[in-house]
Image (spheres, rainbow, N blue to C red):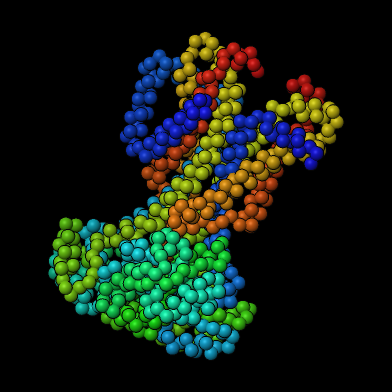
Amino acid sequence: MKYLHLIWAELFRRKTRTILTLVSILAAFLLFGLLNGVRESFEQAGQSAQGASRLQTQSRLSFIDTLPQSLDARIAATDGVKAVTYANWFGGAYQDPHNQIFSFAVAPNYLDLYPEIEVDPKQREAFDATRTGVLVGEGLMKRFGWEVGQRLPLISTIFPNRDGSKNWAFDIVGVMKPKDKASGGWYDQMILMQWKYFDESTPYNRGQVGWYVSGVRDANQADRVAKAIDALSANSDHETKTMTEAAAAASWMKQTADIGLIVGSIMGAVFFTLLLLTGNTMAQAVRERIPELAVLKTIGFRDGSVLGLVLAESVLLVLIGGVLGLGLAALLGPILTLGSGGVINMPPVGASSWLLGLSLMVGIGLLVGALPAIRAMRLNIVDALAGR
Amino acid sequence: MKFLRGLLWFLVTVAGIAIWLVSPWFVLLALAAAFALWLLLTRRGRQAGSVTQVGLSTLRQRIGASSVIVVGIAGVVAVLAALLAMAEGYRETLRKSGSADSAIVLRGASAAEVMSTLMHDSVTVIAQAPGIARDAQGRALVSPELVVAANLPLKGGLPDEDGSVQLRGVGDAAWMVRPDVKIVAGRKFASGRRELVAGTGAQRQFAGLEPGKRIKLGNQSWDVVGVFHSGDAMDSELWADAEIVATTYRRGSSRTSVTAKLTGASAFKGFKAALSADPRLDVDASTTLDYFSKQSEGMTKVIRIIGMVVGAIMAIGAVFGALNTMFATVATRAREIATLRAIGFRGVPVVVAVMLETMLLALLGGLLGGALAWLVFNGFTASTLAGGVGQLTFDFKVSAGVLWTGIKWALAIGFVGGLFPALRAARLPVTEALRGA
């Protein structure tokens, strides 16, 4: 620690070079911060404690096929099930059929199973009481500038209304806020409507349910309960497939894109380039300082200390750039989310990103400093001072 | 004052880069030609040429530092090209699935086939619309189809892990409406039987789709009797007899879409007008080209934007790497440059020489990155959920356009990375530089 001043002075011996290198490192870790956040939010979708204790029951045929509503009571009676609710995919779109919005028709007790969605009790009452009422995610409200109390025209890309047209009208009665901003990006962007109103209005859905969600008493029993629910309809014409919400989300994400692979290859390319670049800077820095290092050795610095000094310098260089980059990513994320009005939802840079980032910084710093440091350690004082 | 001038330079550079990146190739070719002429014909140009040669001849001594420019830019271009190739491959696959002279009819306001429902009466009415081509026997080339999603075990997935695949119930007409679809193994399914054929893309994604095997859809067993290939989005589907699919999925006599071969691209207008004028129908008709382009629009845009943003951030890193190297180069060659200035070379040749050297290194990096992306990613198979229902497999396509974009980016990075060191080289105070080092 007592050499920090010395290391600092050496680092900024050539200001231009150090600053240019710092910006390169900054760019690399800015990218790392942004991409790692995306990767994590994909991987953690549905992986919350609630996700493991909620079961999703769908038609075994495919996710677009429906189940009879009569299953509701039978699932509720299954041993280990605490509560059960159901929902239908509405396929809503705003203004243009291609401008799709996550919208579901849900049973009255749906929100009871999702304690991570916060709704003002008064607005919840209004939702229960208003046939055409909808609850809208906070982000969606902001994105389109909607207000509570206004009428909301939606197009359903699947279901016609009673009069045969696909244009539906709802009343916004409340706002949904995710309790945990970091993992609640999805709840921010959806619309919930009354299942009863939906079912009675469209001629295409007579008592059919898209999927059931059941809360289990004990998450460790989830597998057993899932099997019991599937057994209810075995060999019928509406066989079901039940899995935990976490597993369903993971499978869905996996089918959408292999984010881990994409992010991994980009970061591989970025860090390989970075290694070369910083390595070159450090090699230059040591090369032009050979006489100085020799002087240090002459006045009594040991080989090990010189090695340590150069290594510390390179680690410090990467750390400064990296922390600035990650910090910038943490700043930019929310700005991007806000600026795009919720179209792009950048997850914040979490603790695990910081941890992984910091260890990467130290690792890269050591790797990059190794060769120049060894060279500095092996310096022969006489040769170095003579400029040989 | 100095700051203002720096800011001005910066803004001019940014604007120049933006124009450069959006310019079509012929403008850039003209620029290159003008530059080459200047280099060959004017005195200054020839001077610049010879100074560049001197610089390049000493490049070998600076090989480590120079490789930073090459590798850094190669990395940017490789990542950019890979992401653009992904967008391109996805777009290509869907675009190829459609043509201007065939039409697809869906129920109004349906974003994708699987969301639409057409009753039997509507299907009959649609088949009588004008403009539909006929085969040698005089039958209209109209194919009512029923598209549903089916759950199948993924290849290499966990025991109970299912993926979603698009199952298309078709009749005989489907093969005539889409002449590109060819059976490559086994045979077609027989009508009225629980048999299906699988596309080559679906076969790659899902387990058990080899001819002769039996798979379960819901609680019913189906025989896989053949494999087809079409080179487009159909490859990711399963095809079976429409009647049987309808009974399995309880769809009665309804269908999801009608695909019709038209007499020509010009016949579409009349076809669409006739359908929308018919009071018995509430349908949307579009050419299949339009339909599939729309399907790919959003996804392609997202991938392209991600590619550009990632590329831009990486490019910033590479620019500073290049700046670093070139400043070091100018510093080591300070005495040489000062000598040139002392014997009468003006600033312009010196600036041009440093810039040229950087841009040549950048070009090398761009070519290297492009080649790398092409070697690794061209034809790389990826898949995603498309149209809301099934896995769509597509190949990355490192096209000439993608490579050209990569090269343009590389040159832009080289330009910025060389400009400021070049200006410093030109402003080097001659006496000091000669005395120093």
Q: Nearer the viewer, residue A327 or A73?
A: A327
Q: Residue B20 lies in what quarter of the image?
A: top left
Residue B411, given in percent of the width and then of the height, sits at 45, 34
Q: Residue A224 lies in what quarter of the image?
A: bottom right
Q: Nearer the viewer, residue A253 or A207?
A: A207
Is residue B299 something that shows in the picture?
yes
User: Please, is residue A203 above or below residue A366 in the view?
Assistant: below
The residue shown at (49%, 89%) is: A74
User: Please, is residue A176 above or below residue B11 in the view?
Assistant: below
* Extreme residue toward the right, this view: A300
User: Please, is residue A337 above or below residue A48 in the view?
Assistant: above
Q: How many dots with numbers?
A: 0
Residue A313, given in percent of the width and then of the height, sits at 71, 38
Q: Residue A63 lies in what quarter of the image?
A: bottom left
User: Please, is residue A74 above or below residue B178 in the view?
Assistant: below
Quadrant of the rendering where the C terminus of chain B is positioned: top right
The residue shown at (38%, 85%) is: A207
Residue A258, given in percent of the width and then of the height, sits at 51, 60
Q: Is A237 left or right of B190, judged from the image as shown?
A: right
Residue A145, given in percent of the width and then of the height, sits at 40, 60
Q: Nearer the viewer, residue B282 or B398?
A: B282
The residue shown at (46%, 29%) is: B9
The residue shown at (58%, 39%) is: A23
Is residue B135 something that shows in the picture?
no
